[in-house]
Image (spheres, helix red, strand yellow):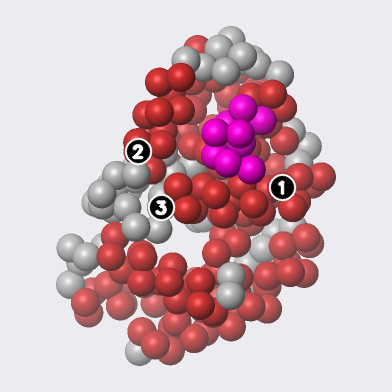
Amino acid sequence: MSLAQWWQSTWSDLELPQPEPHVLHELLTRYAEPHRVYHTAQHLAECSKHFQQARELARNPGAVQLALWFHDAIYDTHSPHNEDQSAAWAVRVLAGVGAPTTLQDSVRDMILATKHNAAPDSPDAALTVDIDLSILGASATRFDEYETQVRHEYAWVPEEAFREARAKILREFLARPRIYSTDFFYDRLEVPAKANLQRSVARLGA
């Protein structure tokens, strides 16, 4: 499924009219910004693939998909407010097509859950977060590519500082009772994710 097809499918599942074409254009332009190396259309496509595989887990498939579309819409490695701004954009788009406030709130909460600073508080938020984190359980080759991509996005950070900060983040994931909240992703990705994280932490010298 192409990204354009996925966009159409998302709004069909939401049973809402698609927003004006400039919304998708602006969204894809954001994901193609030159400072992005991992948080690009490649990441969106990978999220789409994982969603299609786990679709039956979604209570509201359209809402989960829209949260995935917008969860990295705003991405500035110098800013701590990316998810908040991304969620606000999604809410504006939903409001513009007449979506109920309950749906707006649900999508906003799912996007904010991708800050990964607290356990997801709903089944759909858990699914959204697990899909976002699916890269951790990718093949060793893809995971190593991801780590290189993230380093490029933070090229402005000195090497020692980056290594310390990155190792801290990865160790925090390893310290969790489980990385994936849903059994679907836990059964498939938990073991390779921990192996990838342990290898990366060792490589960072932490």
* Residue picked out by circle 1: 52
Looking at the image, residue 131 lies above or below residue 69? below
Residue 153: x percent and y percent? 29, 60
Whether the residues at callouts 3 and 2 have beta carbons within 8 Å, the answer is no
User: Which is more N-terminal, label 2 or label 3?
Assistant: 2
User: Which is more N-terminal, label 1 or label 2?
Assistant: 2
- 3 is within the stretch colored magenta: yes
| Residue 72 shown left or right of residue 8 in the figure | left
Task: Judge by depth and name the residue closer to the eye, 140 or 96.
Answer: 140
Residue 169: x percent and y percent? 43, 69
Question: Which residue is pictured at 40% across the width and 20% down the height?
Answer: 22
Q: Quadrant of residue 159?
A: bottom left
Question: Which residue is pictured at 49% across the width and 53% down the height?
Answer: 43
* Residue picked out by circle 3: 39
Residue range of the region highlighted in magenta in the rendering: 1-9
Q: Main secondary structure of the magenta part?
A: helix
Label 3, label 2: how many angstroms apart (C-alpha)?
Answer: 10 Å
Question: Which residue is pictured at 39% across the width and 87% down the height?
Answer: 203
Q: Is residue 92 visible?
A: no
- 206 is within the stretch colored magenta: no
Question: Which residue is pictured at 59% across the width and 70% down the height?
Answer: 138
Looking at the image, residue 52 lies above or below residue 170? above
Helix, strand or loop at mark 1: helix
* Residue picked out by circle 2: 30
